[in-house]
Image (cartoon, helix red, strand yellow):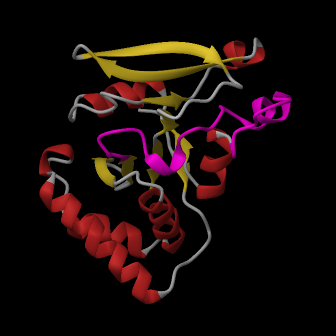
Amino acid sequence: MAAGKKASTKKMAKAESEALLTTLKARFDAHGGRHEGVTWRAVEARLSAAPGALWSLAEMERTGGEPDVVARDKKTGEVTFFDCAAESPAGRRSVCFDHEALKARKEHKPKDSAMGMAADMGVELLSEEQYRFLQTLGGFDLKTSSWVQTPAKIRTLKGALFCDRRYDTVFVYHNGAESYYAARGFRAALKV
């Protein structure tokens, strides 16, 4: 699985951190099949050592991502969070792919770009491989779609990739990077 971006260096107030940890633990407990063999104690230890990660997770939560643990590296202890909301996070839709695409639009510019929002949040877009792995944990993006990391060659030609799940199958598509739709956002990955 490709590496997710390291967490932000921003910090949260203690009460906000505690509230977020309560939310994350409840989701972790409710969806044990996403992270078999991983204990909350191990996750909490990683989060305690990386306060900026909580800020990034709070941004994932605030924008509708419903972040949850999907993996833990047995050698390093690193924990991976993905957005696990049923549909592409509502607070991250109607965005084009990246800043270059946003600049290229002359009319009807979207409010932001997926890559720009991800950088501001201290996270990365899921890769195609990560997106396919997520789909093994449940049915996601049955009505929406999500931008994914795009190879440089495709992006150089002004394209970008997005994925969704229809007919119980994961599809990868292409679109102009400057396009944006109300039903397309992006899913994030964060390694802590």
Where is residue 31? Give x, y as percent. 16, 51
**Residue for point 33% across, 47% down:** 73
Would you identify the image quadrant in which residue 181 lies?
top right
In the image, residue 102 sits, relative to residue 152, either above or below, namely below
Quarter where residue 165 is shown: top left
Instruction: Pinpoint residue 88: horizontal percent, then vertical percent.
Output: 41, 39
Residue 36, can we see it?
Answer: yes
Judging depth in this view, the residue of 153 and 90 nearest the camera is 90
Residue 2: x %, y % from top left = 47, 34
Q: Residue furthest front?
A: 108
The stretch of residues the image draws in magenta is: 83-112
Dividing the picture into quadrants, the one containing residue 46 is bottom left
Tell me if 78 is positioned left or right of 34 in this view.
right
**In the picture provided, is 78 more to the left or to the right than 114?**
left
- 108 inside magenta stretch: yes
- Residue in the picture at 34% in, 54% down: 66
As drawn, 113 above or below 162: below
- Magenta part mainly helix, strand or loop? loop
Asked if residue 9 lies left or right of residue 145, the reply is right
Which of these two is toward me, 60 or 136? 60
- Inspect the magenta stretch and tell me whether residue 52 lies in it: no
As drawn, is 173 to the left or to the right of 24?
right
Q: Nearer the viewer, residue 121 or 74?
A: 121
* Residue at the image position 62 percent from the left and 40 percent from the top: 114
Name the image quarter holding the N terminus: top left
Q: Nearer the viewer, residue 99 or 69?
A: 99
Quarter of the image with the C terminus in it: bottom left
Asked if residue 74 shows in the view, the reply is: no
